[in-house]
Image (cartoon, rainbow, N blue to C red):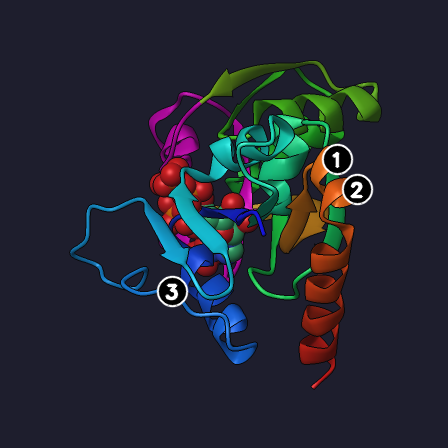
């Protein structure tokens, strides 16, 4: 039997993913070890491999077949636009993609003024404003701590993930428009889904049952 390989977005989703797999009896030695510099973990008995990758790279590994299955946020899937099968909403990692800024930016949005939009998600931001038609925007790509941008005058608004809203609140910002709900998803390589149909379908079936409990 060949190995089935999983690419997990490292960071906050990886632990929740392993919690979910452990409930199905799928474990992996030392993947939880915070000290380890290892990136790949093997379960010999089940013929499974897990590797931890930067979230934005997970869809790339899966599209090229370096991983059969990926677990990643829907934000990353939308942003990367790779050819994948999205097979399951895992029900954790829930948050919203929003346009945020100081209250003073609301009017600029309503009047369709030219605004600068800072985001880790330039493609999602571009699509959102393109579909709104009347708003002209300049998108500025950032790589993190995006809430800084309106505070220091880099942009009028940001497009970013909001979960509890505490980062916005702590920085005097607010949600101005909601773009979409997000959660963690399971994605599958298109060839793997055909070649490993039985094992992947069984996994999806088990995860669905677990979700209903
Ligand atoms: N409050 C939240 N903030 C950020 N991401 C969240 C939140 N809640 C759920 N998520 C989900 O977790 C995913 C991973 O977030 P995490 O913060 O671990 O990595 P990241 O900051 O996107 O990656 P990196 O630090 O490599 O840039 C996000 O893509 C999103 O789908
Ligand atoms: O609504 P909240 O619960 O406050 O969560 C949202 C914050 O969390 C994320 O940042 P992250 O911690 O991933 O750091 P980053 O900004 O450097 O990506 C996101 O970009 C927001 O800043």
- Disc 1 residue crowd, few under 14, some 14–19, many 20+, Cα 10 Å: some
In the shown orientation, is residue 27 left or right of residue 178? Answer: left
**Alpha carbon separation for disc pair 3 and 2:** 26 Å
Q: Tell me the CA gap for discs 2 and 1.
A: 7 Å
* Classed neighbour count for the residue bearing mark 3: other residues with Cα under 10 Å, few (<14), some (14–19), many (≥20): some
- Chain-order first, disc 3 or disc 1: 3
Q: How far from the left and from the top, in percent, is residue 86?
A: 74, 45
Q: Are marks 2 and 1 in contact (CB under 8 Å)?
A: yes
Q: Secondary structure at mark 2?
A: helix
Q: Which mark is residue 194?
A: 2
Q: Nearer the viewer, mark 2 or mark 1?
A: 2
Locate residue 191: give its quadrant.
Answer: top right
Q: Which residue is mark 3?
A: 28
Q: Which mark is residue 190?
A: 1
Q: Residue at x 38, y 64 (%)?
A: 28
Q: Secondary structure at mark 3?
A: loop
Q: Which residues are magenta?
A: 142-171
Q: Please state which of residues 141 and 148 is positioned toward the viewer in this rendering.
A: 141
Q: Quadrant of residue 59?
A: top right
Q: Which mark is residue 102?
A: none
Q: Along the line of sight, which residue is nearer the eye, 34 or 115?
A: 34
In the figure, is residue 136 to the left or right of 42?
Answer: right
């Amino acid at each position: 039997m060949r190995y089935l390989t999983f690419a997990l977005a490292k960071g906050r989703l990886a632990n929740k993913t392993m919690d979910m797999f452990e409930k199905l009896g799928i474990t992996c030695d030392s993947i939880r070890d915070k000290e380890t510099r290892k990136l790949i973990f093997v379960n010999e008995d089940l013929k499974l491999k897990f590797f931890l990758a930067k979230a934005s790279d997970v869809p790339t590994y899966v599209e090229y077949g370096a991983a059969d299955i990926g677990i990643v946020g829907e934000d990353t899937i939308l942003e990367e636009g790779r050819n994948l099968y999205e097979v399951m909403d895992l029900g954790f990692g829930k948050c919203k993609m929003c346009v945020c800024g100081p209250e003073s930016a609301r009017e600029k949005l309503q009047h369709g003024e030219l605004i600068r939009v800072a985001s880790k998600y330039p493609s999602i931001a571009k699509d959102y404003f393109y579909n709104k038609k009347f708003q002209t925007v300049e998108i500025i790509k950032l790589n993190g701590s995006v809430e800084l941008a309106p505070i220091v005058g880099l942009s009028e608004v940001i497009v970013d993930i909001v979960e509890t809203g505490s980062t916005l609140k702590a920085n005097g910002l607010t949600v101005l428009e909601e773009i979409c709900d997000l959660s963690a998803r399971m994605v599958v390589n298109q060839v793997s889904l055909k070649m490993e149909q039985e094992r992947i379908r069984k996994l999806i079936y088990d995860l669905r049952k677990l979700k209903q409990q």
